[in-house]
Amino acid sequence: MSAVIANRSQPPGAAAARPSQGLSALLRNTQALDPLTPVDSVADSMLDSRYAGLLSLPVVRGDEPIGTISRYEMMRVFLMRFGRELYGHRAIETLANRNALILAIDTPIDEAARLIAERIQSPITDDFILVDSGGRYLGTGVVLDVLRAMDASLAERSSELERAYARLKSSQLQLVQSEKMASLGQMVAGLVHEINTPLGYVRNNVEMTRNTLGDAGRLLGAYEAIHRSLFEESVEPPADLPDRLAEAAELRRRVDESALIDIGELLDDSLHGLGQIAELVDNLKNFSRLDQGLLQKADLNQLVASALRIVQHVMRKRDIEVIFQNGELPEIPCAPAQINQVLLNLLNNAAQAIEHEHGRITVRTQLMGARVLVLVEDNGKGIEQKHLERIFDPFFTTKEVGKGTGLGLSIAHQIVTRHNGLLRVVSRPGVGTRFLLALPVAAREVRT
Ligand SMILES: Nc1ncnc2c1ncn2[C@@H]1O[C@H](COP(=O)(O)OP(=O)(O)OP(=O)(O)O)[C@@H](O)[C@H]1O
Ligand SMILES: [Mg+2]
């Protein structure tokens, strides 16, 4: 009895088959061997070129699979002394592997791959049999086809992963950008507040100076009028001289010496206020220049001082005492705007953690070995143990909706990592929290 028909060398669906799909795309229409077929004739059939892709042939009674007969098994028998003579006339079922892998056609490809991997042995000697839901023979499946399908799907998954990674990266960049804008907005709000205070008293001083100078001008006018009436208008003193003198005396009383001294002080104050405003504007200019994220040499003490200036109105409003102990530091290469962002996040978090009336935030800087350290310590409510390991996770926040995005620390952590630095925390609930920021004095490479 001849053995095989319609054996396609490669099923069309092999590469396109999806792992979650069933095995129908990999089905090969292999005509099964009757269990009684003589071994000899099976050996001849195995040389048929249409069989080329199969490691083993299915042995089926009616439509019930009995097992498989592999080329390997045939070789083993025929290599035996008198093997062909001894076995050639026997029925193939005597040599069939009755433990062959039989899979239902709707078995997902990845499940099939798992089952194959479980049984696989070296050398690989068998393919597998495919049956319908009733266990009836449908055809064969080839181990190599399953591997190809898995490979194609792995390649697809990895390119999917790459695409997802690229998307994630760009959305992360957007987040960093929006956080930057938020801190810029916050800084501008802080600066506006800071500028308003000196602006208020400079305006006040200028108004007072104008009033005093107005009186002084009128006094001069009065004196000039008296002078003219006494020396130019007539020989006789004019009749209204007493009135004029009284008016001059009144004006003289208002513009006394102390008022003129006051003007000097008011102008000094105003100059001071204008100096403050100029400094704040300078800060703003610097900040926007720094915001390009460029790597430059920066003095961390100056960055801390500028961050403290930005948050000082918040601290004052909340009555939080801020102590800055600055150690001597070398300039370090960094992206100052980004470090500023980190410092602002730490200071804001510290301020927000303080819920009592004796708030204190201490910022210390120091040089330690090849690192510059900034310690930000608060006596706020602290961080619970179970939250400690999550505070650097994006979107982790314990603040009420609308108050915190939970991005501050995760972005700070990213920035610090890109600077090859460290951001660490120790905290005791009810006592306070200390963040340690360490940046290398000589950055190997900063990816800003
Ligand atoms: N100094 C601190 N004291 C107590 N808890 C803190 C402190 N710093 C951070 N945390 C905790 O870590 C969480 C995450 O902080 P993170 O800065 O990432 O986000 P957030 O402050 O909640 O929101 P956002 O920074 O976007 O306004 C905070 O919600 C808070 O629970
Ligand atoms: Mg925060």
Image (cartoon, grey):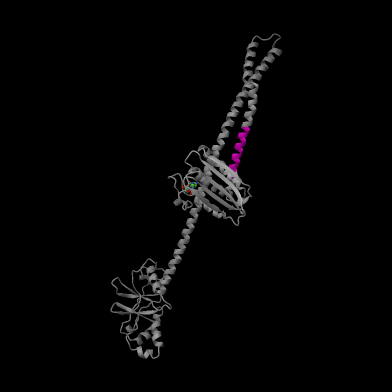
Percent x, y of residue 69 = 36, 81
What is the quadrant of the N terminus in the image?
Answer: bottom left
The magenta stretch is 270-286
- Image label count: 0
Classified by dominant secondary structure, the portion drawn in magenta counts as helix
Examine the image and state in which quarter residue 321 appears: top right
In the rendered view, would you say 406 is above or below 109? above
Q: Nearer the viewer, residue 245 or 320?
A: 320
Percent x, y of residue 371 = 60, 53
Q: Magenta stretch: residue 147 in it?
A: no
Q: Nearer the viewer, residue 242 or 72?
A: 72
Q: Nearer the viewer, residue 332 or 162?
A: 332
In the rendered view, would you say 234 is above or below 407? above
Camera sees residue 48: no
Camera sees residue 365: yes
Question: What residue appears at the point 40 percent right and 88 percent down from the top-left corner?
Answer: 80
Q: Nearer the viewer, residue 47 or 210?
A: 210
Q: Magenta stretch: residue 278 in it?
A: yes
In the rendered view, would you say 210 is above or below 70? above
Left or right: residue 33 versus residue 252 is left
Left or right: residue 172 versus residue 80 is right
Examine the image and state in which quarter residue 30 appears: bottom left
Percent x, y of residue 283 = 59, 42
Percent x, y of residue 152 = 44, 68
In the rendered view, would you say 333 is above or below 309? below
